[in-house]
Amino acid sequence: MNGSEPGQRPAPLGRGRIALYALPSVGVGYMLFLVSLWFLKFATDLLLLAPEAIAVLFAAARIWDAVIDPLVGYISDRTRTRFGRRRPYMLVASVALPVTFFWLFNPPATLDGSALLAWAAVGLFVVYTGSTAFLVPHQALGAELSQDPTERSWIFGANFVTWQVGAFAAMATMAIVENALDAGSARELLPRITLPLAIASGVFMAICAVRLQERPEYQGRGSESLLRSFGDVWRNPHARPLLIAFFIDSIGIAGVGIIAPYVADYLLGGPEMLLFFFGFYSVPAILLAPVWPVLAARIGKRPLWLGSLVVSGCGFGGFYFLDAGNIPILCLLASLIGAAGSCAQVIVPSLQADVIDWDEWKTGERKEGAYFAMRTFLMKSAFGVMVMLVGVTLGDTSALRARSTHGCERSSISGPRNATARRFSPRPTPSTVRMAPCAR
């Protein structure tokens, strides 16, 4: 806690407490990144579930995940225990999330058809429930740790870096398992990777929940009404434009992230290109994370973030002009998006923490849970919509698989991969032209 007398500047948190807050994001980032960006491909390519069915199921799970965010945020704001109002939920999730994550990616080999789909449904819904039970209180706790605007940027900057480490581990898992698909050993390999990483993730989450102290003066200061709590969030003139811009940005990030495994596998030469692509995204993002708090202190958080949105838009727009196999431009776009995304992920939650201070001045309440629940609600809604759209787009690929085995010339990319390539390539590729007779 920031022990200080009234009227005095709060004592700095110290690097140890900031690191302790950021620690669990290594594991949570790994698990959620793998589920959010790879489970659709895992379910269609490895479990051989129908793309339409798994896409609708996935979208339903994400919508459920988004809907319960406000409830978890409200309950967390209102909680009063001797352990704090955030940490009890984080501790429960430190067990539930890793267990169901392992469940989701390791179904029994004897399951198929509707039984396998039911297994995936249970796993998805519980994984996302557990993630919400951890993420909303954890993000709210980050906003509570310090009252200093610059220090808040350092808190969320450290959290972003550890999240990226977990995301990189998820990308490595995708590449390793995708390369094992041809050898038929992917199902045997997954438990050897996911079990130790799930255990480590749970340990990191539990350490943070047990050791990181909360501010006792904030306990039980949430709004008495669920509807009024989120009405206050939306009526806040500083919060509303922030949330709208964040939602628009999340749609772009979700679309590119979800199709990235398909693009790497089907257009760029193999699944190992996913790790290569993500390296050009994550390295600038991580290296620039310590720069943003310094720049924000000099030029202001809002101008800095608005500038990052312009750069991000240019990066996403560049994909329209990208030819298949144009690796240098791909790397440049990935670096631009990574740099801009890094700024947004550091500055936006820090801005939101500042906005909550304004809400306290108006209402006398501390509603960090409600504000960060609204933010995660919008982010998850964007991902849910994009997953459903991508899955429906892939829906008729299964029909092309059957045709590709009946006398049509096989290109360097197999029939189903060509079907996917045509959906994600803005321009025709040589393999697409060669396969055109098979697609009629």
Image (cartoon, helix red, strand yellow):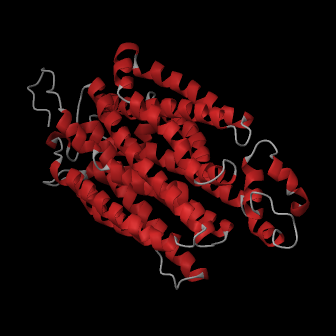
> Can residue 277 be seen here?
yes
Drawn side of residue 345 relative to residue 203, left or right? right
- Residue at the extreme left of the image, as rendered: 5
Residue under the point 54% across and 58% down = 38
Drawn side of residue 353 relative to residue 66, left or right? left
Q: Quadrant of residue 184?
A: bottom right
Residue under the point 40% across and 65% down = 194
Q: Quadrant of residue 323?
A: top right
Of residue 35 and residue 236, the one placed in the foreground of this image is 35
x and y, in percent, of residue 45 in the image: 62, 67
Say if 426 sits above or below 14 in the image.
below
Identify the image quadrant of the N terminus.
top left
Say if 372 sits above or below 352 in the image.
below
x and y, in percent, of residue 412 in the image: 76, 57
- Residue at the extreme top of the image, as rendered: 298
x and y, in percent, of residue 105 in the image: 47, 69
Say if 25 sits above or below 217 in the image.
below
- Residue at the extreme bottom of the image, as rendered: 110
Q: Quadrant of residue 106?
A: bottom left
Identify the image quadrant of the C terminus.
bottom right
Of residue 318 and residue 6, the one placed in the foreground of this image is 318
Drawn side of residue 175 relative to residue 7, left or right? right
Drawn side of residue 389 relative to residue 366, left or right? right
x and y, in percent, of residue 384 in the image: 57, 54
> Can residue 366 be seen here?
no
